[in-house]
Image (cartoon, rainbow, N blue to C red):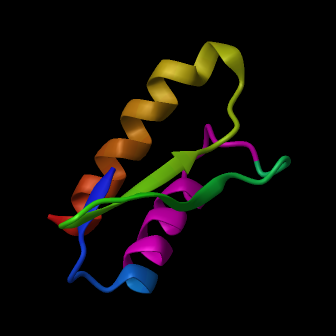
């Protein structure tokens, strides 16, 4: 995921972390990784890496991404 450089980074990271934490499919242990992954000229890449059970991998990714989109929409 990428956000504009002008965006409030701390607020964006908190919203993404909240989306991951609220997912029933994301495991609490080990803890998910949410943080800055890349720096571009006009955007900041955000890594969203929750731990999930193998059968939940695709569904969890889709649900978490949808939740993130809803938070920023």
Residue 60's place in the image compared with 54, above or below, is below
Magenta-colored segment: predominant secondary structure: helix
Number of marks in the image?
0
Please name whichever residue, 50 or 5, is drawn nearer the observer in this view of the structure: 5
- Outermost residue toward the front? 41
Magenta-drawn segment? 12-27
Instruction: Decide: is 25 above or below 70.
Output: above
Image quarter of residue 21: bottom right
Q: Residue, x 47% and y 72% (percent of image)?
A: 13
41 to the left or right of 44? left
Q: Position of residue 29 (x, y in %)?
A: 85, 48
* 59 relative to 53 in the view: left or right: left
Residue 26: x percent and y percent?
A: 64, 42
Residue drawn at x 24%, y 81% is 7
* Residue 17 sits inside the magenta stretch: yes
Q: Residue at x 58, y 59 (%)?
A: 34
């Amino acid at each position: 995921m990428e956000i504009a450089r002008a965006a409030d980074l701390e607020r964006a990271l908190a919203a993404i972390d909240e989306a991951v934490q609220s997912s029933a499919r994301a495991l609490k242990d080990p803890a998910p990784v949410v943080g800055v992954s890349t720096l571009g000229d006009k955007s900041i890449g955000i890594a969203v890496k929750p731990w999930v059970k193998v059968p939940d991998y695709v569904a969890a990714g889709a649900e978490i991404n949808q939740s993130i989109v809803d938070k920023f929409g």
